[in-house]
Image (tube, coloured by chain):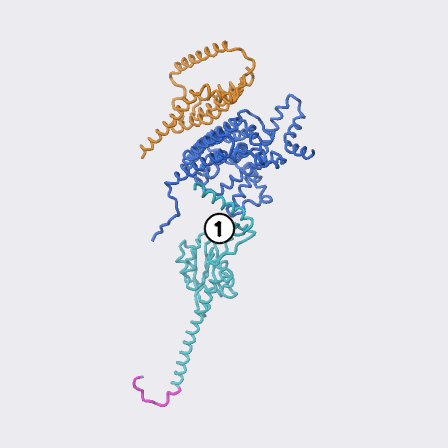
Chain colours: A orange, B blue, C cyan
Amino acid sequence: MSFVFYILATLTLAGALAAVMLKNTVHCALALTVAFAGLALLFLNLDAQFAGFAQILVYIGAVAILVVFAILLTKGSETPKDGVFSRTWLAGLAIAAAVFAVLGWAVLNSAWALPHETAVPEVTVKQIGDALVGRYVLPLEIVAVLLTAAMIGAVIVAMHEKERTK
Amino acid sequence: MSTTLFTVTADQFFVLLQHWVVSFLPGSWQPVAATVVSSAAIVLLFPILFALTTVFERKGLARIQNRLGPNRVGPFGILQPMADGIKSLTKEDIVPTTADAAVHFLAPVLLVVAVFMGFAVLPMGRNMVLVDMDAGLLFYFAMGASTELSVFMAGWSSRNKYSLLGAMRAVAQMISYEVPLLLSAVTVVMITGSLSLTKIVAAQDQYSYGLPHWYIFTPWGFAAFVLYAISTTAETNRSPFDLPEGESELVAGYHTEYSGFKFALFFLAEYVAMFSISGLGTTLFLGGWSAPFAFLSWVPSWIWFFSKLMMSIFVFIWLRGTLPRLRQDQLMNFAWKFVLPLCLLNLLVAALWRFMGDGWLRWVVCSAILVLAYVGMGLIGMRSKRLGPRSYRYAE
Amino acid sequence: MLGEGILKGLAETAKNFFGSYVSSERMTTVEYPEQRIAPYEAARVFPFLVFDGKDWEAGMRCVACQICEKECPPKCILIEKSKDKKPDALGKPQFYPTRFDIDISVCMSCQICVEVCPFEAIKMDTEFELSTTDRFGGLLLDRKELAKSNEYYHGIHPAEAAGVDARLAQEKAKANVKSKAAAEVTATRAAVASAIKGAEVPARPAPEGV
């Protein structure tokens, strides 16, 4: 665990915490963007260039914009009157702890199973591309169909609204 | 031979200069120092170019519009940016009371940072790239995507309905044109087989019969270049796509509530984004730092890169002086119904080019497909317009 | 073909750009105030009062009829009539304005005062560099500031001034003819009267039907 990792981890955690604890919803969305950036930097720290830049391009460039648009177009931009903590926080804490326990158990178990490698394998973009259209072509096509369905759905929803307003 | 030594030295002048400056420091500090020196050079050079471009733009637009442009501040108005800089530094920085102070402050900062990051992967000459990344193009577009968020932040934090409208329009426009931008760049990646910008330039730095292998001289490359040019004009909010900052429409769009130096930062970021994206276009389609003819390769490579960059900037200024502004819905229609289908078709044509092998046949087939598609889409699009000479009806 | 208009437009602006360095018909801008364009014949800014001859007070054509004051839409003219009369260009005694103020911050250059003046006394000037730092009276022009000579009028509106002069000369000639005819009539009447007086002694029977 290097010094850089600690800094990046702190940045990501701070962003995520701010995203749930801030009062102003748009500030929360921007803090979430900081968390995304922290994740991307963690990817880059691990020499996963493609994953890191794709994270920035997709999450910060598109998903963050989507989140802020959604906040703006609904009434979410007004600060909530009752504060940001819900009354059922104990149940939420229990569920979060359970999920963390499952994930931690999975990571730790698989860490023993992996051979201890000292050198980081060089994964070039070419290898990712080959894998995507070679071994993982079916998941790629399914994701493409999913995205197309989402876009068509959005167009249909917008079209229906237009007809209703006419 | 002395001429070759001289040309090589002139070509590698800045690289040698950087090595000389860095050599004063101890060995372990040298890689970091080299990066710092190169970054400092970029951060110093492009704002100076920005200052010159503002003068050229004002004088160029003025000459196109039958007037003179600034000519009082220095010989031919060259020192006008100094006057502008002093003005923007000494103006009062007004932040509205209800504005979100933190976000209002961070928006121009974030924009400038994101825009300058793009220069890290542009090869400005032989061996003159700051970071030679394997996924350089992807890094560039990732940085470009970050600019959209800061535009939104600027518009929202001003608590002004005109700013918010301008920001929404700007973000919608930038997102819509991001897709054709990426697709036209992807055709180049497909043919070159690499995302690394240095490899793309190296692939174009070859000559057959004295003519260069620039991608713009191929049918799919020419189409991709035109579509890329349209998308970059829209991405940087330049005329004719400058509705988000149209002065006659929305006061000043998303930078209405910014005064003084912050406004100057927005202005700087817009122009530096223009440089950066023209630099990318030069690298992808115009051969980067390679000379147009084989016998001209004695001219230093960085001179070619910057000349092509400035040519692109002049074309931007020329377009601004010629075309009227597009309305928001016309802009969106254009992106999704014309530019995007042509980009997708161009991908297919590029693939066809690659698989048909060398020869004259692939030139004919690819050009024919592209020309037919363009003319066909034009006819379909113009069918419902019924454009003709205007007829006037006067009150009797 | 799609895109043809854009290419034609680009060619036109390129012609403008390069042409502005070589031809003056492309570069129509002049660098004011070092270079000035001469005003046109029909240029107008604010009114002025015309006077004939050398003395502005004696030669002023205005007879204080106050028609322009009444017709002015923003009511920027203020006239005070004199109590006595002085002879005008035709010799007839006329009133004259002791006070003629135009507030040029109100004047809208509509030229109605010029159109309604029966005496060709008020005309439109082309002087526009009238800015002053005096906020309270600087833009209220009085009689002395408004009076400019007929030669000046010829200088700024030559064709119009020539027409006005011709008209005035015509009226003067008509007035001369009329006065000469009137003078002749009075002279003949006087001669007849004196002749009748002289021939009063021999009594004559009153002729019938005189």
Query: What quarter of the picture does the N terminus of chain B occupy?
Result: top right
- Give the amino acid at mark 1: Phe
Write down the chain letter for disc 1: C
**Would residue B34 be found to the left or right of residue A62 on screen?**
right
Q: Among all residues in the image, which is located at the extreme left? A: C208
**Would residue B3 be found to the left or right of residue B188 on screen?**
right
Please report the residue visible at 54 percent of the width from the left and 45 percent of the height from the top. B69
Q: Is residue A102 above or below residue B229?
A: above
Q: Which residues are magenta?
A: C198-209
**Would residue A64 be found to the left or right of residue B84 on screen?**
left
Please report the residue visible at 49 percent of the width from the left and 52 percent of the height from the top. C137
The answer to whether one can see residue B272 in this image is: no
Query: Is C206 inside the magenta-drawn segment?
Result: yes
Q: Is residue A135 above or below residue B266?
A: above
The residue that disc 1 covers is: C136
Density class for disc 1 (Cα within 10 Å; few <14, some 14-19, many ≥20) is few
Q: Position of residue C140 (x, y in %)?
A: 47, 54
Residue A100 image-quadrant placement = top left
The answer to whether one can see residue C14 in this image is: yes
Q: Position of residue A130 (x, y in %)?
A: 49, 21
Q: Among all residues in the image, which is located at the extreme bottom? A: C202
Q: Pick the residue in front: B126 or B50.
A: B126
Query: Is B232 inside the magenta-drawn segment?
Result: no
Q: Pick the residue in front: B285 or B99.
A: B285
State the predominant SS element of the stretch in magenta.
loop
Q: Pick the residue in front: B102 or C31.
A: C31
Name the secondary structure under disc 1.
loop
